[in-house]
Image (cartoon, rainbow, N blue to C red):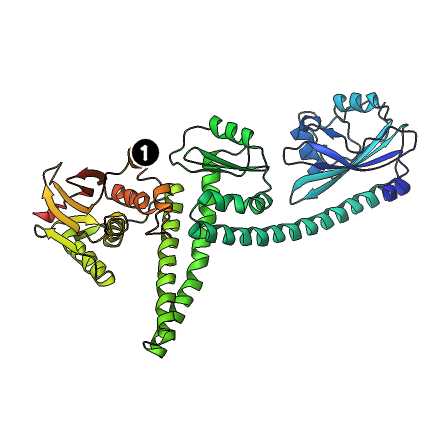
Amino acid sequence: MRQIREFTGFDRVMAYRFRGDDSGDVVAEARRDDLVPYLGQRYPAGDIPPQARRLYVLNTLRMIADVGYHAVPLLGAEGGAPLDMSFAVLRSVSPIHVEYLQNMGVGASMSVSIVIHGRLWGLIACHHMAPKRVPYSVRMAADVLAQVIASTVQGIEAREDAELVEHAAKVRTSLVESLLLEEDPLEALVEHGDGLLESTHAQALVACQYGRVVCRGVDQALGEAIVASLPAEPHDTVTRTSVKEWPDAIQARLGKWVGMLGHDLRDPLNSINMAGMVLERTDGGGNKGTLGKRIQSSSNRMQRMIGQVLDMSRIDRGLSLGIDLQPVDLAALACDMVEEARLAYPTIIYDLHTAGPAFVLADGGRLGQVISNLLSNARHHGEPNQPITIRLAPRDGPGLGLAVLEIANAGAPIPAETEAALFNPFKRSSLNNPRNRTGMGLGLYIAQQIVREHEGEIDYRHEGGKVIFAVRLPLAPNAS
């Protein structure tokens, strides 16, 4: 600012920088010693109305040589369109702005715009306490200097944006890895809280699950007040990266984040799985072969977890899971899934009962995912050494009737407080299950969505000492 003041001769030269809401700050100043400093002052967006802001973008230099001027009308041809004065450097300005300058004791003013990506980023504002005429060459030098400043700032911001993207990618990877492996998702969010705040330029992070609230960047009492003031959520887990942002915006942003990371993780996991297969085959039953099996088992488990996270991401963004409906024999599909479970867990007894074919319009892969999840739940939550019963039978219902698939395991009734959140994600009972420490509590949540997209229902009941999950799907027209 000192150099600009020296070659322009103004009493005061200031640099304004605008904020996102169009208010602004005086971020630099060079002035005559006897003038009151304005450095650090902030002014509201209303001081420069939208039409004036637009003119600053179109015409980057404006000069008022004498604030006490008397405006002279410019007359065009009779009946012609009004003359566009947007690009006139010495055009008359709003009387309100003239009064504003006079109240500050300013006799002359020159403004030079700093425009970046078509938006008014800042201004160089020059004030003189008496009328002042600035030669054309000096005005053009100031205009060129403002363009150099704009180019420099644009380069700095581009580098900062690139660094922020790189930092956000690292935070994203680290966060979702923690969410996949940590038993408590709130702890994972708090652990990465500083990184999330830096990546989003947010003021605070507040996370709530089952009434428990954790905060970063804001005290606990205020965090709890923020959660209490929010509208009811469709799910139990609520995450905020800013005290001003609402649930739908955050869910959409996190959903995209998680979806992107899930795809990023799948390729390296496939490579790890292949490496495990090579180790197993090259060493037979030796130490490397055992290590290879463990690597494959772990990577397959991670793949399933990533698949669940991706599905949850799609559900939270209001997207379909991609159901492709075709005639499917539910009895044959159940047999295949049970046989697969028997091979993987030969010590568990699976008692399967079907009453012949039961065709439904379904996506075989997605429906297999539901059956696999219910079998896994029965295996992890049922009493040890007790059989898992699978029954499939048609029943009366709307239209052509229903195919009802029930999967039961011996066990105590699910507590009422747990039952109320049975189909919610990240259930505490799933996260703390010692028989399934890597479970995230997403299986039933996703299974319910899959069944709903098949126009069916899934529910729980306890009967005869058994926990029973039932899936009801409409029979296809050709079922008879």
Say whether residue 180 is left or right of residue 60: left
The part of the image, by quadrant, that contains residue 286 is: bottom left
Q: Which amino acid lies under the numbered mark 1 shown in the image of this protein?
A: Glu
State whether residue 286 is above or below residue 412.
Answer: below
Foreground pick, 154 / 211: 211
Q: Residue at x 82, y 21 (%)?
A: 103
Q: Quadrant of residue 477?
A: top left
Say which residue appears at 87% left-offset and 44% top-offset: 3
* Nearer the observer, 170 or 166: 170
The residue that disc 1 covers is 417
Image x and y of residue 447, in percent: 28, 46
Q: Is residue 149 above or below residue 105?
A: below
Q: Is residue 427 visible?
A: no
The local secondary structure at tag 1 comes to: helix
Q: Position of residue 480 (x, y in %)?
A: 7, 47
In the rendered image, the quadrant that contains the N terminus is top right
